[in-house]
Each structure stands twice: as structure tokens, then as C-alpha cells.
Amino acid sequence: DTEVTQTPKHLVMGMTNKKSLKCEQHMGHRAMYWYKQKAKKPPELMFVYSYEKLSINESVPSRFSPECPNSSLLNLHLHALQPEDSALYLCASSQDHIQVLNQPQHFGDGTRLSIL
Amino acid sequence: DAKTTQPNSMESNEEEPVHLPCNHSTISGTDYIHWYRQLPSQGPEYVIHGLTSNVNNRMASLAIAEDRKSSTLILHRATLRDAAVYYCILRSVGGGTSYGKLTFGQGTILTVHP
């Protein structure tokens, strides 16, 4: 069982909908990450939060809006997505993004998102 | 960013050792070598990491070449559960825009036959 919990596991939405993906961890980790993974491709980093502050934005379109309300929670708000945004969205956490660089990242099993 | 090169796919038989190679000829002195794997329908899972010396843990062993331009992940006795995509990743601690990031390459698809 993964220690990073992502909900929902599956999401189907129209291009005009607004929805949110949720990620939760209770390992005391202070860095949290969003990745996007297209079918048969490797994960690609989208955002990094370190101590609840946005540390890295990999030039992600503004229709994806991350939020870190506290150290255990990470959200990804979705609005006006395109069909090409259909993918597996993975959340990960680690002890720290900078100070403890070689601590592993723990991944959730992802939310499979389909845009109609 | 330093790149890694892995074979697209490899096959093994159950209970036999598996050696998964990775080339990283442009590795810098501050790059750690990380391995993750991704089982079907799951998120990636950390396997092992190292800098210069060979490393062992309960999941696998990591053999790093003396010049650090290549490494090999060793699964000592493959099981059906080891069938996954294995990613070799360089994680930079040396500053710059790639600092601390995990940048996944294409990985190696490992098939384990009963």
C-alpha cells in the first residue's frame, strides 16, 4: 500500500468543467510534487512545493493551478482543460526538496484523468 | 541536464539474476544515480541510489563503474512481481536549474517469464 494517497483514482471531465485532484501524506514530508504521465511515457515534473511554498513550476499552463494548504495536503485545481491534458497525474513527497536531496520520493498511484 | 541511456526492453526468467544497464557518460561529480521502477497501474517506486561506491539494499544492488559513466542495477533473483519499467535517473546536487529534480528517461521494460 502506498503512503501517498491520491483521490479520485479516475476522473472524467468536460473541457468547461472545474475539478480538483487531491494528494495526502502523513509521513511528515515537507516537499511535495506533481507529475504528469502520458501513456507509455515517463513521468514529467510539473510543480514542486517545499515547506508549503511553490518552489518549481515547470512552465505549466495556467489551467493547472496547484495549492498546498498545509504540509500534508497538495491539491491540483483544473479548469478549462484540453483533450491533450488526458494523462495520469502523480503526486509524490519527500522529506525535503533541497536539504536532504537523496531521500527518495514516495509516489501515489495517481489519478487517471480523461478530458472529453 | 546529464542524460541516461537504457535499453528499451529486457527479458528474464523467474529466479534468475537480472542486470539492468544504464549509460550516463555526461555525469558530473555532483550527480547521484537513482533507480526507480514503476509496476503496471502504480506510481514509481524508489529502488536504490548511489554516488561512487556499490550499494546494496533489500530490493537490489547497484554497481557503479569506476569512471561513473555507467551503472548496473542487479536484481539477484527475479520474481514475476519484478516485471516493471525501470528508470535510471541522475539527480543533481550541484546547483543550477536541475537542482534536486528527478528527470525520468524512457526506462527499460523488464519482462519476467515464469
Image (cartoon, grey):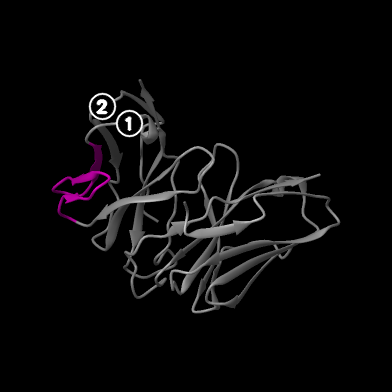
Residue segment shown in magenta: B52-75
- Chain under numbered label 2: B
Drawn side of residue B89 relative to residue A64, left or right: left
Q: Which quadrant of the rendered structure holds the C terminus of chain B?
A: top left
Q: Amino acid at mark 2?
A: Glu
Residue at 83% over, 50% down:
A14
Asked whether disc 1 touches disc 2, contact meaning CB atoms under 8 Å apart, the reply is yes
Is A27 located above or below residue B32 in the figure?
below
Quarter of the image where one finds residue B5: top left
| Disc 1 crowd, CA 10 A, few/some/many (<14, 14-19, 20+) | some
* Local SS, label 2: loop
Q: Is residue A53 above or below residue B102?
A: below
Q: Nearer the viewer, residue A67 or B105?
A: A67
Find residue A70 and report its horizontal and vertical position in percent: 57, 78
Image position of B101 (left or right of A39)? left
Q: Residue at x 46, y 40 (%)?
A: B39
Q: Which quadrant does the N terminus of chain B fall into?
A: bottom left
Is B55 contained in the magenta span? yes
Residue at the disc numbered 1: B79
Numbered disc 1: secondary structure: loop
Q: To which residue does mark 2 refer? A: B15
